[in-house]
Structure formats: C-alpha cells, structure tokens
C-alpha cells in the first residue's frame, strides 16, 4: 500500500478543554474519509498543548537567581529562562541566543520546546510541551478507536534540531499504537547479506513527512491523516527512540 498523507481542513484555533477527537472526526467526515485499521493521526504538539491548557502568561512567572544569571548569558527573557529550567533536568549548552537543555521528557532540545510562534497575537504568553505526550496520544487514540472501532495509531510531533545537520524537522515527542523503532537486524538486504545494525526510526520518519504537509508557519494544518504506514502497528513509547546517555556522544 502506498503511504498517503492528508492534511485535515477546517481545524479551528484550539482552546483549553477542546476535544481533539471530535474535531478530528468532524474534519475527516468533511473529506469523506472513513477511518480504517492501520490509519495513523499525526498531530502538531501545539494543538495538544493548547487543548491541555499548557499556556503560561510570562507576567505571572517570577525568575529565580539561576534563571537571572542564565538570562544574562543568553540574552533571553529571565521569565522564559525560568520556565525552561522548570521543564528541564539540566542545561547542556548556554551562550548568547542559545539555551540547550535536557527536557524532563528525556530528549535534548532548544528552550525545552517552549514556543512563542503560532501561540497568540498578543505575545505575552508561551506554550509548554504536553506534560506526558505518550499519555496524551494514548487518550486520544482510545477516543478515536472507540468511535471508529478501528485499530489506530496516534503520533504527536514537534520541530527539533539535529546534532549533525542544520535545519529543523518534525520529530516524535509522543506516540501510541505505532512503533517508534523498527528493528531490521537479521533481515537480508538485496544481496542476501544479513543486516547487523539497522534500526529504523519509523515514527520519526513519519513525523518528518507529516511536518512537510503541515508546514511551519501560517498554514494552519496541524493534523495529518496517514494511511499506508509500511510497518505493523504495535504498542510503543517515546523512550524507545531516545538514545541512552552512555551512548550519546553529544551530551
């Protein structure tokens, strides 16, 4: 089956408490798409965070001395730095205009994934990542499966940088019902040689593809329907995509 990615139209601006499953089902109906076993819904992190009320007014944040000091180093708003520290386990790099941290969720990211873009017109608030994106994906998947009676996957993605390359791309921060990694070790290549080290970041590959369809600016396509994912669905968590610290040459 060919992989098809369909951005869902008519997604409204999301507010705390909105039911994303109802919004998804309504949009699918407008396209005459009926969910089938194996379908995957890919959601931009921002709408999940907004629905879960993860917006923070910077005016209500009181920075601690550590945040004040890092703000002087980076040139960032000390209130933003305070939030970054609250969302992180440790600082990896700090220099002018750059603050790289280990997020509470386990991955390395700039500014702990806290974002101003596509948040509000006023500019006084920022958006944190979902508290537990795997749980968010699991809950949404359960609601969609209850409605459709189909076996589905849900992927929550965000824009991440990479250690070896310039530019951001869509990456998984939460998933349910689809593999994060696909282990091809032991399979044969075209010439009959057995693969010794190949593990495919299948969820991240889908995240990057869906991110192309969503866009990064004002396209307003934060949900993508995917059909034809080339691997069997299974239970998984973000943790299988995160390289252990002892194997990570960049920490």
Image (cartoon, rainbow, N blue to C red):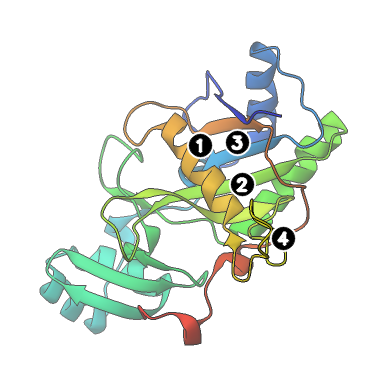
Q: Where is mark 2, residue-wise?
A: 155
What's the CA distance linking mark 2 and mark 1?
10 Å
Q: Nearer the viewer, mark 4 or mark 1?
A: 4
Q: Where is mark 3, residue-wise?
A: 18
Location of residue 84 by image quarter: bottom left
Residue at the extreme bottom of the image, as rendered: 246
Q: Where is mark 1, residue-wise?
A: 210
Nearest to N terminus: mark 2 or mark 4: 2
Image mark for residue 93: none
Q: Residue at x 11, y 68 (%)?
A: 96
Q: Is residue 49 visible?
A: no
Residue 181: where, in percent of width, then height? 64, 60
Which quadrant, please, contains the C terminus?
bottom left
Mark 3 element type: loop
C-beta proximity under 8 Å, tags 3 and 4: no
What's the CA distance linking mark 3 and mark 4?
44 Å
- The reply, left or right, for residue 70 in relation to residue 148 is left
Mark 2 element type: strand
């Amino acid at each position: 089956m060919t992989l098809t990615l369909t951005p869902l139209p008519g997604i409204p601006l999301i507010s705390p408490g909105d039911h994303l499953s109802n919004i998804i089902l309504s949009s699918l109906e407008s396209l005459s798409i009926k969910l089938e076993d194996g379908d995957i819904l890919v959601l931009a992190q921002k709408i999940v965070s907004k629905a879960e009320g993860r917006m923070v007014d910077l005016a209500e944040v009181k920075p601690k001395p550590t945040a004040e000091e890092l703000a002087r180093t980076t040139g960032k708003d000390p209130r933003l730095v305070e939030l970054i520290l609250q969302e992180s386990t440790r600082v990896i790099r700090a220099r002018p205009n750059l603050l790289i941290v280990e997020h509470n969720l386990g991955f390395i990211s700039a500014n702990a994934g806290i974002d101003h873009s596509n948040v509000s017109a006023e500019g006084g608030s920022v958006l944190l990542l979902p508290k537990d994106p795997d749980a968010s994906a699991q809950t949404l998947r359960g609601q969609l499966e209850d409605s459709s009676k189909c076996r589905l996957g849900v992927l929550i993605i965000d824009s991440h940088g990479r250690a070896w390359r310039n530019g951001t791309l869509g990456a998984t921060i939460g998933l349910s019902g689809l593999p994060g990694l696909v282990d091809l070790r032991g399979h044969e290549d075209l010439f009959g040689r057995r693969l010794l080290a190949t593990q495919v970041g299948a969820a991240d590959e889908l995240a990057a593809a869906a991110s192309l369809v969503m866009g990064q600016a004002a396209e307003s396509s934060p949900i993508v329907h995917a059909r034809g994912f080339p691997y069997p669905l299974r239970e998984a968590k973000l943790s299988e995509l995160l390289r252990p610290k002892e194997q990570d040459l960049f920490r």
